[in-house]
Image: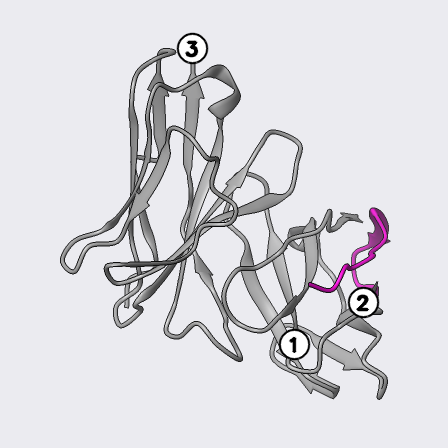
């Protein structure tokens, strides 16, 4: 299974755009790239998933270059409620392998 | 459509007792996954089940832990003879299929405290 590397923590201010980059050099051909968000004392919540190029939904955008060795989660205009841990996972079905995640702290 | 349900939300057991954690997947989902999150750590996969079958139990401790997902009723994670190191949050997730775009929906978790 592909190993992922993300920044351990990031700080931002309300209203800013936040980009979190994840590297997954050994991603398999069949893997999708999925991002989850976890608030303290809650289960993870699916944010977005993609295979390549760009995916956008009502919450975020996901940018995946052609070589698929990395991906960038973009959160537009963050608010205090976006303070959470964000996990990047290559997924092909079955179990999810969570790394350490990125702890995003949004300040007023 | 109700989300993934887990009960109890909090469970306190003394060393040596048994803990039974229940998970009801979302309607229409036949794939269930259990994860454990120790304090200040990330989530670790434990077991993946489909109705009446264990698909992947590579994350389950070899002893004292078992899981089932019967044809009728919730999935059960059972921990026998609990020890203090079992204290953690146990999350259940479900998905409609186990392949491809496998979005998993997580429950609120059961927080087990072993005294």
Point 79% across, 63% down: residue? A15
Q: Secondary structure at mark 3?
A: loop
Mark 2 and mark 1: span between their CA atoms? 11 Å
Q: Residues within 10 Å of mark 3 (few under 14, many from 20)?
A: few
Rendered position, A99 above or below A78: above
Pointer 2 residue: A24
Point 74% across, 62% down: residue? A78
* The label number, if any, that marks residue A31 in the structure image: 1
Point 61% across, 61% down: residue? A36
- Dot 2 falls on which chain? A
Image coordinates of residue B38 in percent, x first then y, are 58, 32
Quadrant in the picture for the C terminus of chain B: top left
Quadrant in the picture for the N terminus of chain B: bottom left
Q: Residues within 10 Å of mark 2 (few under 14, many from 20)?
A: many
Q: In the figure, is residue A84 to the left or right of A9?
A: left
Depth-wise, is mark 3 or mark 1 nearer the camera? 1
* Stretch in magenta: A1-21
Q: Secondary structure at mark 1?
A: loop
Q: Secondary structure at mark 2?
A: loop
Mark 3 and mark 1: span between their CA atoms? 41 Å
């Amino acid at each position: 299974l592909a190993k992922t590397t993300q920044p351990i923590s990031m700080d931002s201010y309300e209203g800013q755009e936040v980009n979190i980059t994840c590297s997954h050099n050994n991603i398999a051909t069949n893997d999708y790239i999925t991002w989850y968000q976890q608030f303290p004392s809650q289960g993870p919540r699916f944010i977005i998933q993609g295979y390549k190029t760009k995916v956008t939904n009502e919450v975020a955008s996901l940018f995946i270059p052609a070589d698929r060795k990395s991906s960038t989660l973009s959160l537009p205009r963050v608010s205090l409620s976006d303070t959470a841990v964000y996990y990047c996972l290559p997924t092909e079905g079955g179990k999810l392998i969570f790394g350490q995640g990125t702890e995003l702290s949004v300040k007023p | 459509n109700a989300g993934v349900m887990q009960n109890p939300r909090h469970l306190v057991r003394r060393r040596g007792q048994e803990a039974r954690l229940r998970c009801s997947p979302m309607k229409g989902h036949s794939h269930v996954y259990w994860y454990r999150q120790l304090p200040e750590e990330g989530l670790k996969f434990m077991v993946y089940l489909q109705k009446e079958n264990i698909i992947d139990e590579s994350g389950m401790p070899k002893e004292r832990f078992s899981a089932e997902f019967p044809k009728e009723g919730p999935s059960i994670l059972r921990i026998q003879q609990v020890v203090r190191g079992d204290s953690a949050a146990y999350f259940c997730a479900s998905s409609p299929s186990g392949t491809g775009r496998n979005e998993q929906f997580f429950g609120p978790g059961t927080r087990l405290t072993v005294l």
